Amino acid sequence: MKLIAALASPYSRKVRIVLAEKKIEYDLIIDSPGDPATRVPAYNPLGKVPVLVLDDETTLFDSRVIVEYLENASPVGRLIPDDTRARTQTRRWEALADGCTDAANAVVVEKRRAADKQSAEWIARQQDKIERALKVMADDLGSRAWCGGDHYNLADIAVGCALGYLDLRLSDINWRKEYPNLAKLAEKLDKRASFVDTAPPRS
């Protein structure tokens, strides 16, 4: 199978981490949707990455759909609990983390516009979403070792990718100082090989 991804995309990173944790081999094709020569729309009509291309040329998108497929494709390194309640909580964590990333990306895109065309109100709305998401993440994590309790799973991967994206694109948000438990979690995650190997370029 092939994964079409952008190295700086937190959603691509989430899928790459899942592939690594589940020890699934694949070919990585780097393609940024913002590149004029991008071929992403040929695989995903929405023009977004990541896209997983299966051996029969079936294409899967977005990251949540791909992760669900990968979890069922291999029994190695289970990342989504079988228990209904635990599974629902894990997917809730993923939705919260992805929503935080969505808001962060909206701020990044808006700030790339000419200064006189930027909407301060729009940026403030997205920043409020980020702050609320961080607070709920921190409150729900509490003093637990992992987002889901005693075991590392997809919830931690999603949160780790969201926090990593904030560091990459909105480094002025000092979430580590305000939420030390999230900082502790991020420190643990950043030591895992799957996170090290998928760290986005800083340039």
Image: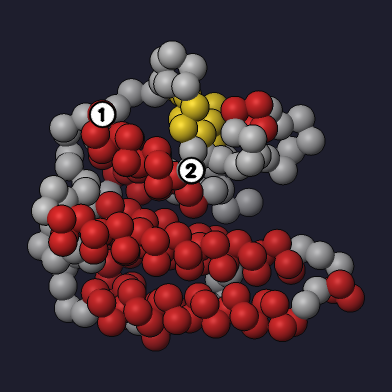
Label for residue 73? 1
On screen, residue 40 versus residue 131, left or right, reads: right
Secondary structure beneath dot 1 equals: helix
Is residue 144 depicted above or below 3 in this figure? Answer: below
Label for residue 102? none
- The residue type indicated by label 2 comes to Asp
- The residue type indicated by label 1 comes to Ala
Residue 136, given in percent of the width and then of the height, sits at 35, 79
Q: Residue at x 17, y 78 (%)?
A: 143
Give the CA separation, mark 1 to mark 2: 16 Å
Whether residue 190 is visible here, answered yes or no, is no
Is residue 154 depicted above or below 30 in this figure? Answer: below
Residue 98, given in percent of the width and then of the height, sits at 45, 60
Q: Quadrant of the N terminus?
A: top left
Residue 134, given in percent of the width and then of the height, sits at 41, 77
* Residue 161 quadrant: bottom left
Looking at this rendering, what residue extends furthest in the top direction?
Answer: 56
